[in-house]
């Protein structure tokens, strides 16, 4: 009776109420934002590109995370529901949470690799990538996350603390094997993203200087810079809402403290911010969203302005004819107009 009373009082405390509101806001924002991305990709065929397919997978992951892990966190972490205890339930809840952590990490890494190929390797990568290969990469993301997460948690199958709550089992998992897997599972992908992001930024800067003689430099340079900014924002967000919370999990060992709660909160906040970082901040998705509000069941598509595409085609022809010595640089640069959510991928 006393244990149940304590659990209920903890759930009704002022700090607990604030934490519940914070998680609830993130949960609703994650579901709504990522659902919009999925609806736009279903409604508009011109958005169904290779990078957008990876973004759709990330949105699906974030929706599942918001619908399962966030309510579970409120129940086992904040309210400490008395029925959430025992060996099997604790193993499932903790492993399920970690599974979605790595799904997000691996998918973001693949997204960065896709942008690296598009920017650095240009036409060669553009002609190589297909929707079929994008689907294979998504399957690989899920399989890798399953293998890494549940391969790690097989080491916790023998841990039996009786009817101890989930938080106690989680501490044991972290002490026994979690730290050995969580740190490389985050730091290695983060290092890969930093290296690829640096190469992308250097390539963008180098080509922005080489295309100065050409007529479309102003519009293309803006698109160029936006691509590089998105990559930089990706790395920053991954550190703030991935690497930093992981470090907090290892430092703040006392459950219930605000520092410890912040580690969980930042990880969940990532699910709400992903649609803004990778989709809704781009011009094509904003146009699609506006068109969707006007014609939710229509057939019109959010095409870019024809004048821009026509000018690019004309300039490319002139470049091939009059500037043959710079053909490779210009061809690579023209691909930048296709970077981030452009139509016309091979299927």
Image: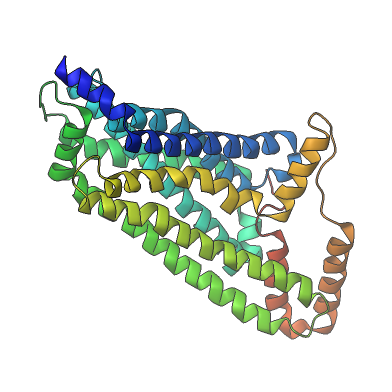
Can see residue 46? yes
Q: Estimate the x, y position of residue 285 in percent, counting from the top left.
A: 71, 48
Instruction: Return the residue nearer the eye: 120 or 250.
Output: 250
State the scheme by which the image is colored: rainbow
Side (left or right) of 60 relative to 1? right
Hey, which quadrant is residue 331 in on the image? Answer: bottom right
Q: Estimate the x, y position of residue 90 in percent, counting from the top left.
A: 23, 27
Q: Is residue 127 above or below residue 336?
A: above
Instruction: Return the residue nearer the eye: 195 or 36.
Output: 36
Q: Estimate the x, y position of residue 296 in percent, counting from the top left.
A: 78, 31
Side (left or right) of 137 relative to 246? right
Q: Is residue 341 above or below residue 120?
A: above
Can see residue 344? no
Instruction: Return the residue nearer the eye: 328 or 278.
Output: 278
Side (left or right) of 336 relative to 32? right
- Seen from this angle, which residue lies furthest top? 1
Rendered-image quadrant of the C terminus: top right
Side (left or right) of 278 relative to 149? right
Q: Residue at x 52, y 65 (%)?
A: 232
Hey, which quadrant is residue 81 in on the image? Answer: top left
Rendered-image quadrant of the N terminus: top left
- Seen from this angle, which residue lies furthest front? 14
């Amino acid at each position: 009776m006393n244990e149940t009373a304590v659990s209920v009082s903890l759930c009704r405390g002022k700090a607990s109420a604030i934490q519940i509101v914070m998680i609830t806001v993130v949960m609703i924002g994650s579901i709504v934002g990522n659902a919009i991305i999925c609806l736009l990709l279903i409604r508009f065929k011109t958005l169904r590109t290779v990078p957008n397919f990876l973004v759709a997978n990330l949105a699906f992951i974030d929706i599942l995370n918001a619908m399962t892990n966030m309510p579970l966190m409120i129940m086992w972490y904040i309210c400490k529901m008395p029925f959430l205890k025992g060996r099997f339930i604790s193993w499932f809840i903790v492993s399920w949470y970690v599974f979605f952590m790595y799904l997000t990490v691996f998918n973001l890494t693949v997204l960065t690799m896709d942008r690296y190929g598009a920017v650095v390797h240009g036409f060669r990568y553009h002609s190589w990538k297909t929707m079929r290969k994008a689907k294979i990469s998504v399957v690989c993301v899920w399989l890798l996350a399953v293998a890494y997460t549940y391969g790690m948690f097989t080491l916790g199958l023998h841990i039996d603390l009786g009817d101890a709550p989930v938080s106690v089992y989680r501490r044991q998992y972290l002490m026994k094997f979690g730290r050995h897997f969580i740190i490389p599972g985050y730091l290695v992908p983060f290092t890969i993203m930093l290296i690829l992001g640096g190469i992308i930024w250097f390539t963008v800067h180098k080509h922005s200087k080489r295309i100065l003689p050409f007529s479309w430099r102003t519009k293309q340079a803006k698109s160029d810079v936006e691509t590089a900014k998105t990559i930089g924002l990706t790395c920053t967000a991954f550190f703030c809402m991935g690497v930093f919370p992981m470090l907090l999990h290892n430092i703040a060992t006392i459950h219930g403290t605000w520092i410890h709660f912040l580690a969980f909160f930042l990880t969940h906040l990532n699910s709400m911010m992903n649609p803004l970082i990778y989709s809704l901040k781009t011009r094509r998705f904003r146009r699609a969203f506006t068109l969707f509000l006007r014609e939710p069941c229509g057939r019109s598509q959010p095409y870019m302005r024809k004048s821009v595409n026509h000018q690019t085609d004309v300039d490319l022809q002139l470049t091939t004819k009059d500037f043959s010595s710079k053909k490779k640089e210009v061809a690579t640069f023209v691909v930048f107009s296709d970077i981030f959510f452009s139509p016309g991928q091979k299927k």
